[in-house]
Image: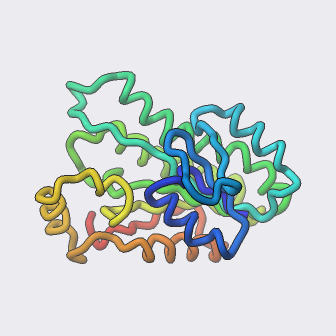
Amino acid sequence: MIIITGASRGIGKYLFDSYIDKESVIGTYNNSKPIEKLDNFVKLDVCNFKEINDFIEINLENLKDITLINCAGISYNSFTHKSDPEKWKKVIETNLFGTYNFIRSVLPIMRTQKYGRIINFSSVVASKPTPGVSSYSASKSALWGLSKSVAVENAALNVTINNINLGYSELGMIETVPEEYKKNIIAQIPAGKLCEPKDILNTVQFLRETQYITGSSIDLSGGLI
């Protein structure tokens, strides 16, 4: 069973579409309602632990050999000294607490079944100094510490957790970037191009199939550091 948060758009939707005809998949959404495969989606607010935990408990019998892929996330662009504290906080709540809420809900099942794969989407901006994204950077770098702790707590039970530090891809938030600025971004990437969706899928699948990698953060950035 694959659970993908934020599966109605961007990277989450791409992964959902890639797996739906091959495996059992549940996708979550909150504000962006999907238009296809509605039976495979559930509306959940990742910031609401009770909502998530209740859903997991109701569906316990169907949840076997879980892969949890945490794609749900938001961004907020502002220089820190001008930032809105509530908007800044909301990014942390969604990207960090939202990821934790789902991990916390599925870990007991994974530990009992002695199998689990947790894959989080972090970002290259967690380590690359980037102006205007302090909340996003903070939320994504926090996933590194979270994963290391969860990894050592569960590695002996065949439960792994890893992060993909994504650079700039053809999916997701890049769609909102003006074309001229996008050219400047690509010029900074040693590979000379945006990350193709298939490379994201290949990395996710690699982490699903590899038991001995856990607590790690893999850079998928075309050499951008």
Q: Is residue 54 visible?
A: yes
Report the residue at 52% width, 53% height from top: 8
Q: What is the image's colouring?
A: rainbow
Query: Is the residue 102 above or below the residue 167 in the image?
Result: above
Report the residue at 64% width, 68% height from top: 20
In which quadrant will I find the N terminus? bottom right
In the rendered image, residue 98, in percent from the top left (x then y), is placed at: 56, 40
Relative horizontal placement of residue 169, taking residue 6 as reference (left or right) = left
Q: Residue furthest right?
A: 61
Task: Using the image as rendered, state which of residue 156 and residue 221 is in the foreground.
Answer: 221
In the rendered image, residue 197, in percent from the top left (x then y), is placed at: 42, 71
Query: Is the residue 184 above or below the residue 135 in the image?
Result: below
Report the residue at 77% width, 37% height from top: 54
Task: Using the image as rendered, state which of residue 85 and residue 160 is in the foreground.
Answer: 85
In which quadrant will I find the C terminus? bottom left
Relative horizontal placement of residue 204, taking residue 112 as reference (left or right) = left
Q: Residue furthest front?
A: 35
Report the residue at 27% width, 38% height from top: 77
Examine the image and state in which quarter residue 82 appears. Answer: top left
Examine the image and state in which quarter residue 111 appears. Answer: bottom right
Number of numbered labels in the structure image: 0
Examine the image and state in which quarter residue 134 appears. Answer: top left
In the rendered image, residue 122, in percent from the top left (x then y), is placed at: 44, 54
In the rendered image, residue 146, in percent from the top left (x then y), is placed at: 55, 47
Q: Is residue 152 visible?
A: no
